[in-house]
C-alpha cells in the first residue's frame, strides 16, 4: 500500500509539473488577452495554508474572524481615491472579476429605479446581456461608432423617445475588442439636455480603470464625471494569478439595499455570501509594491509599447490602428497558426494585441516576423477574415 501511495504521488507531481511548464510557455506569448504577469506573489503563498473567507460587508465587524477585511478596506480606499469617489459617500468590495462588478452595478440601478431601461452599446462585453437576463431588466442596445465608442446621437434619440422611463446607462470604459471609452461627460450632457430627472450610470472599467487615471488627457469615466458605480478587474492590468476585481458605488445607494444577517453578525450587501479572502491580500500587496507612481509608470510603458507595435505593424504594410492612448492595437485577422501561437483575440475579421506591462519590444518584433513570414496555413484563415480583408483592399 505504501508503495502504491508513493507511486501515485510521483504521477501526481509529474502531471502538475507538465501542466505548469505548459502554462508558463503559453503565458509568455499571450498577446491577445489582458493578463499582466509582471508580479511575484511568493510572499502570499503561506496564506494558502489557511482558509480566508471574506463573508459579509467589509466595512462591518461580524462574528466570523477568518477574513482579510482590513486589507480589503485599504485596497478599496486606494482605488476609491483614484476613481475620485466622494470622500464620505463611497462603498465597495473585492469581487471575483469585472462581470460580478457589473452585475452589482446593474443590481443597484434596478433597486433604485425598478421601472428603468438599460442602454448599452453593441460593443459591450458579452456578459452584459447575461447580467440583464439574470436581473430581468429591460434593455435597448445602442449603435456603436467604428471606434467602438457608443453612438451618442443614437443614445440621445432613443432616450428622447422613451423619456417617460428612467434610463440606466451601461458605459464602456474600454470595449473588449477596440478599447473604446465612452465619455461620461457627453452622456451627462444628454441627460441635462433632455431634462432627465432620474438616471443611473454604471462604468464598466474592467481593463482601463486601473490605468485610465494616469492617461493624458484623462478619460471622462469616474465618479467625478458622473458615475454612480464602477467596476475594475484586478487580474488584468494590476495583475493577479486569481481572477478578481473591485466594485465601487455611492454609499447612499448601497445603504438602501443592505439587510442584516444574524448568522454572521454582518450585513448582506455583496453578490455572494462567501468571498475570496486571498485576492484582497494580492491586491493589497500589488498596491504596496506599485503605489501610484508605479502604476503610472506601468501605464506609460504600455502606452509607449502600443505606439511601437502600431508603427512596426504599419511598417510591413499591415493596416493596424488603435484608439487614442489605447494599449490595444487592431489589425486584419492573420492565419490560424499565428492566431494560435500568440493567442490572439479575434472577431469580425480583426484581431488585436493588448500591450500589457510584462510584454516587451522583443515580443512585438517576433510577432511582426511571424506576420512577415510566408504562411503554409493561409487556407485556414476564417472565411470572415478573408471576406473582410477583400473589402479593405
Image: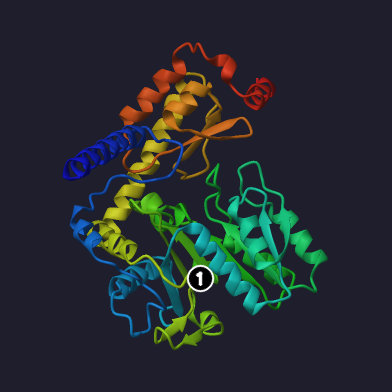
Q: Nearer the viewer, residue 351 or 361?
A: 351
Q: Which of 381 and 304 is in front in this view?
A: 381
Q: Residue at x 46, y 53 (%)?
A: 208
Residue 298 position, x and y percent, is 31, 48
On screen, residue 181 versus residue 216, left or right, reads right
Q: Which element type, helix, strand or loop, lies under badge 1?
A: loop
Res 220 seen here: no
Is 363 situated above or below 286?
above
Furthest residue toward right: 161
Q: Nearer the viewer, residue 123 or 211?
A: 123
Q: Which residue is drawn at 37% across and 39% down?
A: 304
Pointer 1 residue: 271
* Screen quadrant of the N terminus: top left
Is 178 situated above or below 363?
below
On screen, residue 18 versus residue 116, left or right, reads left
Residue 373 position, x and y percent, is 44, 13
Res 25 seen here: yes
Is 8 situated above or below 208?
above
Q: Residue at x 48, y 87 (%)?
A: 260
Quarter of the image holding residue 190?
A: bottom right
Furthest residue toward front: 1
Q: Which residue is drawn at 42% across and 26% down?
A: 341
Within 10 angstroms of label 1, few (less than 14), some, or many (20 or more) residues?
some
Amino acid at each position: 500500500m505504501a508503495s502504491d501511495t508513493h507511486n501515485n504521488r510521483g504521477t501526481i507531481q509529474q502531471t502538475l509539473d507538465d501542466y505548469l511548464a505548459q502554462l508558463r510557455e503559453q503565458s509568455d506569448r499571450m498577446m491577445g488577452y489582458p493578463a499582466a504577469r509582471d508580479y511575484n506573489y511568493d510572499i502570499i503563498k503561506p496564506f494558502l495554508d489557511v482558509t480566508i473567507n471574506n463573508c459579509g460587508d467589509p466595512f462591518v465587524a461580524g462574528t466570523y474572524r477568518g477574513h482579510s477585511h482590513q486589507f480589503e478596506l485599504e485596497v478599496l480606499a486606494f482605488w476609491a481615491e483614484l476613481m475620485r469617489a466622494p470622500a464620505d459617500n463611497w462603498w465597495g468590495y473585492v469581487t471575483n472579476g469585472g462581470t460580478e462588478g457589473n452585475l452589482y452595478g446593474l443590481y443597484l440601478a434596478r433597486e433604485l429605479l425598478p421601472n428603468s431601461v438599460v442602454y448599452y452599446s453593441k460593443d459591450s462585453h458579452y456578459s452584459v446581456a447575461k447580467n440583464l437576463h439574470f436581473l430581468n431588466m429591460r434593455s435597448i442596445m445602442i449603435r456603436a461608432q467604428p471606434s467602438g465608442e457608443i453612438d451618442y446621437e443614437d443614445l440621445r434619440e432613443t432616450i428622447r423617445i422613451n423619456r417617460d422611463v428612467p434610463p440606466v446607462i451601461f458605459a464602456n470604459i474600454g470595449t473588449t475588442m477596440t478599447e473604446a471609452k465612452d465619455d461620461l461627460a457627453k452622456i451627462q450632457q444628454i441627460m441635462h439636455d433632455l431634462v432627465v430627472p432620474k438616471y443611473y450610470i454604471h462604468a464598466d472599467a474592467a481593463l482601463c480603470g486601473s490605468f485610465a487615471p494616469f492617461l493624458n488627457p484623462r478619460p471622462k469615466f469616474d465618479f467625478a464625471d458622473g458615475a454612480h458605480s464602477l467596476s475594475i478587474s484586478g487580474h488584468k492590468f494590476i495583475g493577479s494569478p486569481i481572477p478578481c476585481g473591485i466594485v465601487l458605488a455611492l454609499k447612499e445607494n448601497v445603504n438602501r439595499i443592505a439587510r442584516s444577517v444574524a448568522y454572521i453578525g454582518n450585513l448582506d450587501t455583496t453578490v455572494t455570501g462567501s468571498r475570496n479572502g486571498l485576492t484582497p491580500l494580492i491586491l493589497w500587496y500589488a498596491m504596496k509594491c506599485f503605489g501610484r507612481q508605479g502604476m503610472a509608470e506601468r501605464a506609460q510603458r504600455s502606452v509607449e509599447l502600443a505606439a511601437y507595435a502600431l508603427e512596426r505593424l504599419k511598417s510591413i504594410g499591415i493596416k493596424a490602428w488603435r484608439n487614442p492612448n489605447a494599449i490595444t492595437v487592431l489589425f486584419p485577422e492573420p492565419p490560424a497558426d499565428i492566431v494560435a501561437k500568440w493567442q490572439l483575440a479575434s472577431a469580425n475579421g480583426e484581431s488585436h494585441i493588448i500591450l500589457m506591462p510584462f510584454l516587451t519590444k522583443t515580443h512585438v518584433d517576433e510577432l511582426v516576423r511571424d506576420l512577415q513570414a510566408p504562411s503554409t496555413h493561409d487556407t485556414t484563415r476564417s472565411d470572415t477574415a478573408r471576406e473582410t480583408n477583400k473589402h479593405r483592399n
